[in-house]
Image (tube, rainbow, N blue to C red):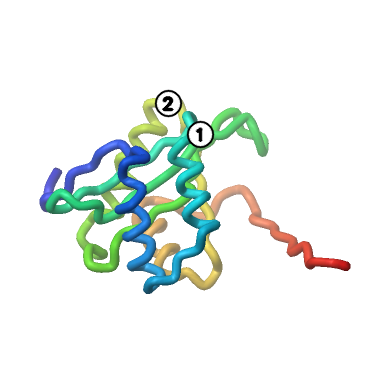
């Protein structure tokens, strides 16, 4: 790969380095819930993911899955998470990871790919727009179930 970036299929063996990427993004704050979620995704058979290696170390990762039929689509691809270590942002790693997962989805008959971001994550929205995402035919709705006594 160009710029010294190597893309490899994700594996549970990369979990410690993936955690360090997340820790760097979160400035040291990392929850057990996040760790458990990522570990769970890495153990599922129907999950796809890639790591980007720079100088032999994990500089970023992407995890997705194929879902369907649901929401009126036979099959759709979903990007669950993508993260790039702050030291390597702006170096093409995110785009290389997106390209790899897009190719996987394409080879598996997926035409529609979705993801979600928070409204205040302008940097993530800008990234997704830069790799071809736009408004979809879906509206993202939410509801907060407040704890009751």
Percent x, y for residue 148?
85, 67
Distance from disc 1 to disc 2, alpha carbons, whole Å, reads 9 Å
- Left or right: 54 as drawn, with respect to 17: left
Instruction: Residue 119: give its label.
Output: none
Depth check: 37 or 2 in front?
Answer: 37
- Left or right: 76 as drawn, with respect to 17: right
The residue wearing badge 2 is: 108
Percent x, y for residue 43?
46, 36
Identify which residue is drawn at 51% across, 50% down: 36
The residue wearing badge 1 is: 66
Q: Is residue 130 above or below residue 48?
A: below
- Left or right: 8 as drawn, with respect to 2: right
Q: Is residue 81 above or below residue 144?
A: above
Name the quadrant containing residue 140: bottom right
Say whether disc 1 or disc 2 marks the residue closer to the N-terminus. 1
Image quadrant holding the N terminus, namely: top left
Identify the element where label 2 is drawn: loop
- Left or right: 136 as drawn, with respect to 149: left
Identify which residue is drawn at 53% across, 55% down: 116
């Amino acid at each position: 790969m160009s710029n010294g970036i190597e893309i490899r299929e994700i594996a549970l063996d990369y979990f410690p380095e993936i955690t360090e990427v997340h820790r760097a993004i979160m400035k040291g704050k990392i929850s057990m819930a996040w760790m458990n979620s990522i570990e769970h995704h890495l153990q599922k058979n129907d999950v796809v993911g890639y790591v980007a290696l720079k100088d032999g170390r994990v500089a970023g990762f992407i995890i997705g899955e194929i879902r369907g039929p649901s929401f009126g689509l036979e099959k759709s691809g979903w990007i669950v998470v993508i993260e790039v270590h702050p030291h390597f942002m702006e170096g093409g790693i995110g785009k290389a990871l997106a390209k790899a997962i897009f190719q996987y989805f394409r080879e598996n008959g997926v035409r529609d790919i979705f993801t979600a971001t928070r409204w205040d994550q302008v940097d993530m929205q800008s990234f997704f727009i830069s790799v071809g995402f736009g408004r979809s035919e879906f509206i993202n709705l939410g509801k907060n179930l407040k704890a009751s006594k």
